[in-house]
Amino acid sequence: MLLRTVVGAVAGAVAGAGFLSTSGVAVRYCNGGPGRAGCGGFLVLVPPNLVLWIFVAGAAVLAGFRFLRQRHGWWVTGVGGALWILLVVAVYHVTYTYLDLYQAERGPVISAATVVAASLAFAVAALCIGRGRTA
């Protein structure tokens, strides 16, 4: 049970950090001004990037579950990905609605929350869904 949770947490942390690093590349490019080519399409790039990193986390969970002889690795991926999206949306909502932060202060909060939410989501999903193989 503990090992399943660790596998989920590590896979979520890898996916969260990867999503954050690949999203940061597009944001840094667009900081030069609103007239740069391709900066308006940033929101179009977020969903495919998120799906890519959820798939990477799923592959990591599946590999860890096979090593531990557990089942339902893809179920963990689906539930963990959905929980990750919900947690990130909740963090955005709380950050922008209730916290009185300047724009420069929001960045580190959202960056840390992205990685922590991914790790927490996949850990909870792995804890609740995975089961050992019998006979």
Image (cartoon, helix red, strand yellow):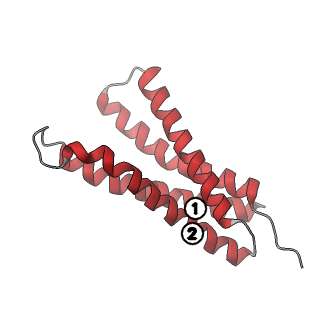
Tag nearer the camera, 2 or 1? 2
Neighbour tally class for label 1: few under 14, some 14-19, many 20 plus, Cα within 10 Å: many
Q: Residue 26, relative to residue 1: is it above or below? A: above
Type of amino acid under label 1: Val
Q: Position of 41 compared to 34: left or right?
A: right
Q: Secondary structure at mark 2?
A: helix
Q: Which is nearer the eye, 94 or 35?
A: 35
Marks 2 and 1, the one that precedes in the sequence: 1
Residue 21 placed where, x, y %? 35, 56
Q: Quadrant of the N terminus?
A: bottom right
Q: Position of 6 compared to 53: left or right?
A: right
Q: CA distance from mark 2 to mark 1?
A: 9 Å
- In the displayed image of the protein, which residue is found farthest to the left? 35
Residue 87 lies in quadrant: top right
Q: Position of 33 compared to 106: left or right?
A: left
Which residue lies under the disc numbered 1? 10
Q: Which mark is residue 60?
A: 2
Residue 109 lies in quadrant: top left
Residue 118 placed where, x, y %? 54, 50
Residue 91 placed where, x, y %? 50, 34
